């Protein structure tokens, strides 16, 4: 059903866990659809220096979470925003059609974490300038 | 990967064909291959074999052999029973009573009819998945032509009060169909004791081959064909008889009749060991379905904070085959509608795990599941955002 | 009785399963027995096997693998195609065009729909059983939603002008189904050349197992499920996949593709020898169906003054298995409706005899039929009140 | 499909043929239904001394023809009239339900031959008495 890469990331997920005092948190999904992802990022000088996740979901949900955290680490925030769900799926050697929504969820989790980071930094900028 | 003994605990999805059954089928593939409708010896030999099988199946469920019609499986038997009585009794009414925990084969067939002028009442079930016979009684109207309630649920193993519903149906003069696909061969099923007019079974759930089933049709039941064509099965089911598979179903029925009691006892002991072991070893786990009035081979639990497929995949990598809800629905994204109908939350429905035991299942297999599962669940829970650290 | 080599000449009724096919099926009965819907390894192994088979079948008929849906046989494929398109296209119209020489699987399905609001036109056929494409064209109305014409007739072997009808159907934008149960694996059948939207086949007519068939459904064809239930076969056909049988159909397709040309040539030579020999040796005998545009393995003759079953029984006692009309109809009292539609008298229809050859058929078998038949017929004619002494 | 007795009578039918100058002929059936029976009887002093048949039809038609001719030989005409289709079928060890009509045909052929004989003898009686 799943590619080797999916299974590898599923069995040995990278970056599991939470980041203390993260710069951004993304929280997407809900128990109704059966997938919940939490994605944490640490940003320094506009570069994502660390990313971690916690996921409740199927094999593809876990593998895409793992892959997306790998893909963003070391990327500039602006670049990271361009990571599409297809890119995540492709990096995993493809996903069964019925599981493509997991890659969408991973993309959304990332976007949501970055949004959170951008909002926070805007706020602190505002605080500083005011 | 290291070669481990693979442990198959998904007998509710399908069973391996018994070697004795395979043995019985083989001659009918290549040697006695005639078409039972042919009057020459090749055909007549095949015909006798099919009739002998019919006797064995009738014996297993306490029916007369003319009341058994072979089909291409359980799904066809359900389609046949429901569409066949619906169309044949349209003059009398258009109301069908069923439950929200039926297998897709019954549920989708009812939905199809609903789109074509029939009305369908779906009864409530309690948190164990039990139907209340009094609810059946209350749902009957003067338009009711069919009641369809499954014998034992394929996901949670709960055994329904079929005999009680049968009495109500009989009193009201309404046809009663039961999908006994998960029950036949596993627990005693006798059509007269149950008071059913139609009963569906499928060979591959009782160590027979895939692609063959049977519908019991009580003498006098008014229904039309589902499969139109030739005059096979006394004009009730068209299509060249699948003789090897029919012979296989016959042999499987014979073996089941012989071994059912002892095997059920053995499985109940293993089942209860596995249930207790899982409850003991895994915090925040819950048994789904009735604790005792359940199929001897069914264990269904919900594990909080983790999702079913990820448990399945991990178990599979350990060589253990299980299921989360019905096998059919595992390719869809919906959580089990059976568990939802029983009132479980989406989270618990997504976190369900079914082990269904079988003839090859040993004490060692159970021990291994009990050793492996807590480890897998702990690993997944460590990843779960639903479990706050320290819970 | 003396042990004679039994000669099976009823391959149109059913064929023995090829030993290579049996070999291919065996592992899927007991070892790789999983349910393809299951996500564990037992299930996924079974699934790959079924998909591999699908590729082979698609290759045989020039289709894409997503266009193949497995069924429980030819009858189900026909029911599915006809009811499926009828129900799905009710909004467009309610008219179906078919022929009076279709197999029961098509004919009875059309009759069923006729009783439920559909109109059915049955085209004429000529004395060879041929449909005229121009008659199809003329029969089309603005209510026509489906044309169903069989590829090759199971009784008389006549091959219909499917490609010509396909063109007419395409021009008119009407779905076209062909029952190719007798053609697939015996003569070249390519869905695009034929211009069909749906095509039914059955494994046991091409040395595959009984109880499995397939419906080719051209991409984009609007039809609803016939078998309602689980989500198997991309939601088009519910029911646990009959994996061993599907694998068997795949292997049978592969063998057919490999051997069809040479085998057809061999059979045509044997067929023509038998036809000529019978015509020569038996006075008042007539070939039914087209002399050349017929299935390579089909011989159908009418013998004046004698009845078919009594010939069959005598042949059977000599170890020769043949048929009179379709195997399905031989248990009924009606003479073949196919022969009657071709304009034969009741007497000639009752006096028909079909020999259908196969892979095991040898020159010696043909010689033996030619030796035995005249003797049997002479004996029966001596008893016949229709033959005045001295005729 | 058929009992041993049916097959035996089918393979070795008794009394096949015609009787020259018969005392009664029965002719029943037609090609539409697929069975035609001709039954000839010779009667002496009210006893059927010979019976022969010609039949176009299935195995059961031939076997019941053969059996009915056997059953009537040596019987008084009045007794022969009492031979029912069931008796013919039973004497053959039974018939498949779908073939019971053949035994009916055999009974009818016999009745028809006896009728023919009775009509003829009435006529000749009449001729004699007139
Ligand atoms: C309760 C129940 N009904 C019907 C079916 C359908 O049977 P089959 O797969 O033989 O069509 C199944 C199994 O899939 C089942 O568990
Ligand atoms: C032309 C034709 N169509 C359909 C069928 C039905 O196929 P099956 O017996 O596999 O249901 C047959 C054979 O019986 C046939 O010859």
Image (cartoon, coloured by chain):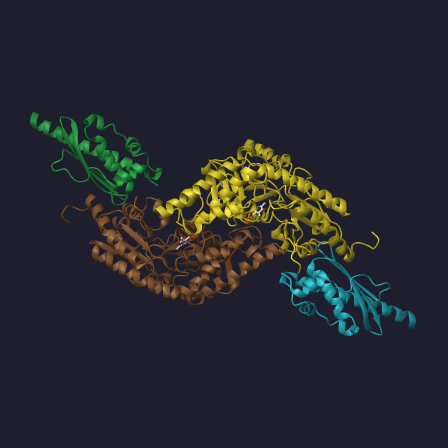
Chain colours: A cyan, B yellow, C brown, D green
Residue B176 lies left or right of residue B390; in this view the side is: left
Do we see residue C84 in this rendering? yes
Query: Where is residue C184 drawn, in percent x and y?
Result: 41, 60
Q: Nearer the viewer, residue C260 or D35?
A: C260
Query: Where is residue C134 drawn, in percent x and y?
Result: 35, 64
Q: How many marks?
A: 0
From this view, report whether residue A53 is shown above or below residue B391: below
Do we see residue B143 in this rendering? no
Quadrant of residue C291 within the rendered picture: bottom left
Q: Nearer the viewer, residue C69 or B310?
A: B310
From this view, report whether residue C286 is shown above or below residue B217: below
Quadrant of residue D49 within the rendered picture: top left
Query: Where is residue C265 drawn, in percent x and y?
Result: 34, 65
Q: Nearer the viewer, residue D52 or B366?
A: B366
Quarter of the image with the N terminus of chain B in it: bottom right
Residue C387 lies left or right of residue D84; in this view the side is: left
Residue B333 lies left or right of residue B92; in this view the side is: right
Query: Where is residue C2 drawn, in percent x and y?
Result: 30, 46
Residue B31 lies left or right of residue A71; in this view the side is: left
């Amino acid at each position: 059903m799943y590619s080797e890469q999916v299974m590898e990331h599923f069995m040995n997920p990278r970056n599991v866990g939470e980041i203390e005092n993260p710069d951004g948190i993304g929280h997407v999904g809900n128990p109704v659809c059966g997938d919940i992802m939490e994605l944490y990022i640490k940003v320094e000088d506009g570069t994502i220096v660390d990313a971690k996740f916690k996921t409740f979901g199927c094999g593809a949900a876990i593998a895409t979470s793992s892959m997306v955290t790998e893909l963003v680490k070391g990327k500039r925030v602006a670049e990271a925003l361009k990571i599409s769900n297809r890119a995540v799926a492709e990096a995993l050697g493809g996903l069964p059609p019925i599981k493509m929504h997991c890659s969408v969820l991973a993309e959304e989790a990332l976007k949501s974490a970055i949004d959170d980071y951008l909002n926070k930094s805007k706020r602190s900028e505002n605080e500083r300038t005011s | 990967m290291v070669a481990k003994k693979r442990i198959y605990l998904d007998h509710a999805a399908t069973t391996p064909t018994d070697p004795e059954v395979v043995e019985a089928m083989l001659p009918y593939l290549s040697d006695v291959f005639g078409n039972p409708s042919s009057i020459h010896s090749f055909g007549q030999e095949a015909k006798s074999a099919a009739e002998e099988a019919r006797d064995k199946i009738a014996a297993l469920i306490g029916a007369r052999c003319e009341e058994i019609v072979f089909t291409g499986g359980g799904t066809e038997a359900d389609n046949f029973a429901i569409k066949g009585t619906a169309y044949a009794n349209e003059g009398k009414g258009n109301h069908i009573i069923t439950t929200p925990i039926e297998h897709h084969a019954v549920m989708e067939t009812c939905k199809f009819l609903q789109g074509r002028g029939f009305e369908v009442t779906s009864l409530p079930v309690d948190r164990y998945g039990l139907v209340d016979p009094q609810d059946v009684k209350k749902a009957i109207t003067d338009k009711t032509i069919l009641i369809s309630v499954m014998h034992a649920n394929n996901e949670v193993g709960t055994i329904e009060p079929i005999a009680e519903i049968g009495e109500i149906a009989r009193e009201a003069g309404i046809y009663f169909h039961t999908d006994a696909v998960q029950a036949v061969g596993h627990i005693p099923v006798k059509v007269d004791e149950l008071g059913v007019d139609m009963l569906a079974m499928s060979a591959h759930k009782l160590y027979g081959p895939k692609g063959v089933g049977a519908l019991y049709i009580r003498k006098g039941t008014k229904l039309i064909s589902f499969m139109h064509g030739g005059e096979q099965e006394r004009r009730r089911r068209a299509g060249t008889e699948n003789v090897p598979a029919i012979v296989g179903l016959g042999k499987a029925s014979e073996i089941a009749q012989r071994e059912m009691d002892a095997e059920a006892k053995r499985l109940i002991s293993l089942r209860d060991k596995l249930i207790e072991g899982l409850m003991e070893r895994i915090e925040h786990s819950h048994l789904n379905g009735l604790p005792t009035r359940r199929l001897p081979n069914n264990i269904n639990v919900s594990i909080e904070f983790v999702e079913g497929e990820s448990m399945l995949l991990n178990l599979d990598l350990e060589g253990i085959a299980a299921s989360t809800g019905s096998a059919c629905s595992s390719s869809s994204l919906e959580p089990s509608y059976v568990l939802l109908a029983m009132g479980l939350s989406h989270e618990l429905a997504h976190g369900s795990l079914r082990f269904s035991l079988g003839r090859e299942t040993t004490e060692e297999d159970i021990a291994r599941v009990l050793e492996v599962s807590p480890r897998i669940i702990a690993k997944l829970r460590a990843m779960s955002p639903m479990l706050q650290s320290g819970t």
